[in-house]
Amino acid sequence: MDFLITGGLVVTEDREFRADVAVDGEKIVSVGGGLPRTPEAVVLDASGKYVLPGVIDAHTHFALRSRGTVTADGFASGTRSAACGGVTTVIDFADQLPGMSMARSARARIEEAAPGASVDFALHMTVTRVPEDLAGEMAALGRMGVGAVKLFTTYRAAGYLLEDDDFLAVAEAANGAGLLVTVHAEDNDTVERFEAALREHGRTSPSQHAESRPSEAEAIAIKKVAAHLGRLGIPVYFVHVSSGAGLDAAREARRMGCTVYAETCPHYLLLTQDEYSGDRAREFIMTPPLRTAADAAALWDAVLGGEIDVIATDHCAFTREQKALGETCFDVLPGIPGVETLLPLVHQEGVVRRGMALPDMVRVLSHNPARLFGLYPRKGTIAPGADADIVIFDPGCSRTIPGASLHSNAGYTPYGGMKVQGWPMTVMVRGRVVLAGDQFVGGPGWGRFVASTPGLAAGDG
Ligand SMILES: [Zn+2]
């Protein structure tokens, strides 16, 4: 045995209980009361602390090349930031590379990510064009352990959007190969119409961002996609649901019998479009945009009511200098950092402020992403046989989130100045301590690609 974590409150997806956790090599080997100490084991005293399964951020964009630049966080700084916030697995994205099959593109992405990664990573495949051998390529992706595809209903001009026929063909092929279909849902026609109207009136400053992509666009797209895929019996996972209207569309689809999973992000729960009226508007531009306080309240209700399956960050960091390159709400680089603050913010605003049960927090941050993306039971719980991805979390530690000194290369966080109670003290990835107190002690290259076992989402448990 290498580590014995003693006396903490162990939290899993369905209960919390006082127990010791023994770690040997990369695995948890036993969980129970009063586990015997062995002379060689390092004892980590977790009394008064929570022992949580490592957080899985199911939506990050590290080293994303887009719009002529690359995001501020590559895999080294991105996963360092993740580790320091208790995130032990990130699920990032592979893009279809020119002249390469999807499986080869994904393999290239794994090679790009692995040297810098200090936490584990899995991949979603972003599909923006239909390859000739669609079914064959999907099957190959499934075999190599890519658990999901991501499809866009918007960004026609940027080449991300799949037109309806292609969208359905890709969704069917992905589902057939056991991959979960995830969708960025904003109706392109609506977005383009609002953009044209704002341009016509010369209202294009960063402060117009929320207006340029209204929540109706989200609701229309969710409704349409869920109806189409529901008819075909294909489960769908909507990334970054941002609004009450979007949520209502998802609820409606569920009532009609569609299998709909919903993800939201801390920024839609904690920030509002009022940020766009300040002179720091650019630092809050992401898509979909921030919404109203009523939207945030509706999203919290859905989180507490179990209607949101996953809270993930959509971490897509740009520095202030990169943000300043854009003049209008249409060309400021969209995206914010978030991976490091995910757990502390959801704990503070969910558990401390709103009385969310600890197992419910574990479910949206770790267990559900593991299950939906085929990483469970290796990830997403604390049990013998699972990877030793563990967060020792001090619920008594009060912090003010610093504006600048987090571990992302963004150089700022949109949550700077917020007060939180609770912070990760020790973080372990496959049995290796990567955060000790305030010290990042991880190593680039320790993180590994984790293959998804396809077909889990459809089975639902
Ligand atoms: Zn994203």
Image (cartoon, helix red, strand yellow):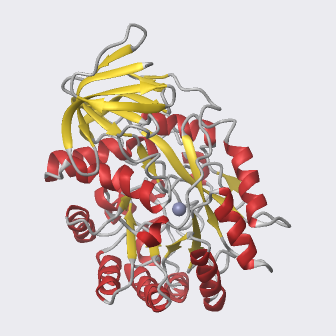
Q: Looking at the picture, does residue 68 appear above or below residue 292? A: above
Residue beneath the point at 61% across and 90% down: 164
Look at the image and tell me in which quarter the C terminus lies: bottom left
In the rendered image, residue 307, in percent from the top left (x then y), is placed at: 27, 69
Out of 209 and 315, give the one closest to the viewer. Answer: 315
Q: Residue at x 20, y 42 (%)?
A: 16
**In the image: residue 123, left or right of residue 29:** right
Q: In this view, does 193 lie above or below 384?
A: below
In the shown orientation, is residue 188 left or right of residue 388? right
Q: Where is residue 423 in the image (x, y as percent from the top left)?
A: 30, 33
Any part of residue 430 in sight: yes
On the rendered structure, is 132 left or right of 437? right
Please state the horizontal and vertical placement of residue 33, each as a whole percent of the image: 21, 27
Q: Is residue 277 above or below residue 30?
A: below
Q: Is residue 349 visible?
A: no
- Residue at (35, 40) in percent of width and height: 382
Residue at image position (56%, 56%) is 452
Q: Which residue sits furthest top? A: 39
Which residue is outermost to the right? 99
Q: Is residue 206 above or below residue 388?
A: below
Task: Locate residue 99 relative to residue 250 in the image: left or right.
Answer: right
- Dividing the image into 4 quarters, which one contains the N terminus? top left
Quadrant position of residue 207: bottom left
